Amino acid sequence: MRFDDSLGTVLSADMSTPFGAQATWRQLVDLIGRGRVIATDTTIERLAAIRRDVPPPIRAASARALAAAPAPAALVAFFAQDELAIAAPVLRSAQLSVEEWSAILPALSPAARSILRHRRDLGRDVHRALESFGSVDFVLGAPAPVAETPPPEIAPVATPTVAREAPVPEPVVAPAAIAYPETIAAASPFLSIASVAAKLPLVAEARRRIEQAPPAAEAPSDGSTRPSGTFPIAELVARIDAYQRQRAETPTPPHREAHTPVPDRRDGPARPADTFRFETDAGGVLRWVEGASRAALIGLTLDHGAPGSPVDGVAAGAFRRRAGFTDARLVVDGISDAAGHWRISAIPLFDRTTGRFTGYRGTARRPRAEESAAPTRPAHSAAADALRQLAHELRTPTNAIAGFAEMIEAQVLGPVPAPYRAQAGVIRSQTSGLLSAIDDIDMAARIETHALDLRASDVPLTPLLARVAEDLAPLAELRGTTLALPDADPALAIRGDDRAVERLIGRLLATLVAAGGAGERLGVTAARGDAAVTIVFDRPAALAAYGEESVLTIDAESEAERGDDAGGAPLLGTGFALRLARNLAAELHGSLVLGDKRLTLRLPAAFSAEMEQASRT
């Protein structure tokens, strides 16, 4: 039998010296934090006994080391009672259950609980427990009461008048001679300003002098004002008259001509704005603008797939990932002060309670002299042209091989033994997959070089889905997967190139069916929204291990290493097929969103004759 005597060795060490206490502290915290020793009352009491002998930098280093270890609740509660600079690393990284947090929270200080309020990985129950301390954590503490002493006796000072040339200095009282009274009552931390000011020594002395002044005073025979502690109305009138006489005698400095015309901004175009701030909703649509014309900016969208989107791919890609972006391009049309080119930067916002994405908040500026906010058109790519040429050269011999294999399989040239016909069938199926891969490469190269010839037309969705499902029936049978088509409206149609739309939906469904498993059901739903047709595809369980965007990185080698022998997977990999589908959807003025459980394809909707149309008369 083996046992761990580390705890006994540590506890038996000499802790009477500063070095021994620090060594014991480090060892105990390390053993408890890594789970080698249970956090019992004995170990926690030993840490509490030597904490006073351990300098704060040593304790802070131990707290930072616990950030990378699953510290137990007892150790977290112990560190939470230390100084805030030492407790903060542990409170920011501790991973405890709801019950453990609920037991620790009452013993924490308001400052320590404020650290937990800024964490986003705690559960809803923990945040609800923190909210229950709100009325206690945000109350200002009242200072300790101070014994009130009477103000010192100060000799009365005559009030200065207009006739006096040199002002009489105010009496100076030493600060030590005045004991300031309690300004905030202990019963309630909130008092009015008047009640606080009334207890100040200077204010109390002024009130005392006013109360001791005689009710009436006769004016002296020399015309001077008798000091009475008040401000006579006659003196105020005299000062006003003196000011007016002095102003009349002083020459007026020269001004510019009174009839100088003031430029009217309405005569010309508005001055262009240099910057503005904005906020969007969860759909990426600008809903609040400050610093520029709202009429020209409200309603613009950061979704590059939306019709008429004024932003480039930087903002659109960040919007799909719910991430921040910097110096993206924005073009605003019109003649307002917001018209022209902009560079925009924004950060995403999330709801504190649910964690749901709520929109963006950002700023916009005009591009500098060395920058340009105009959407850049990709330069002519020689590599893409070479790829298209390679695809063309590969397609010709591959078609010839497939043709000869089909002739052998059909015995067009004469009788062929059964083994050779079977081999010819295998060659024909493999060349068919190779031709599909060549077509995908050619399509990707055309998209890269902007050489894709698209002609818009109305493409009915229901017949298209039926055709694609019929073509994929052998692959679905091979994989043991069921493809459930929607009961869509027969009038539902997509506005786009018929060949590109069919290829997009066909390749997307083929990729999903190839990733499906035995007995799995892949559902497809379709509906019409605001000027767009939305098609939702269920995501196969085999792709559940990948994140929303990491599925685009699946290549053919990783699928081969997975050991899937059923066949039917895309020759160039699932990631390439999905990237091609997303790029093709963007060329059709649509978008493909890869969700955690579903894939959402949006394409422009065709005009329906059943819908009402505004009159042009």
Image: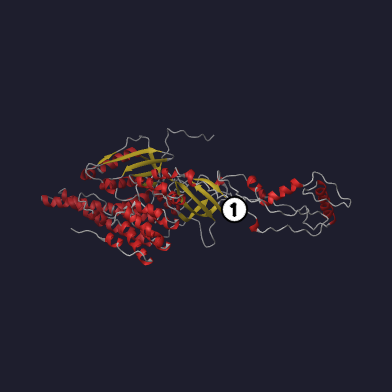
Mark 1: give few (<14), some (14-19) or many (20+) Cα within 10 Å: some
Q: Nearer the viewer, residue 380 or 48?
A: 48
Q: Is any atom of residue 589 visible in this view? A: no
* Residue 313 located left or right of residue 11: right
Above or below, comparing residue 216 to residue 444 in the picture: above
Q: Is any atom of residue 73 visible in this view? A: yes
Q: Residue furthest right?
A: 221
* Residue 387 located left or right of residue 356: left
Q: What residue is pinned by disc 1?
A: 272
Which SS class for mark 1? loop
Residue 372: x %, y % from top left: 51, 59
Q: Nearer the viewer, residue 28 or 174?
A: 174
Residue 329: x %, y % from top left: 49, 54
Residue 222: x %, y % from top left: 88, 52
Residue 566: x %, y % from top left: 20, 49
Above or below, comparing residue 15 to residue 94 in the picture: below
Marks counted in the figure total: 1
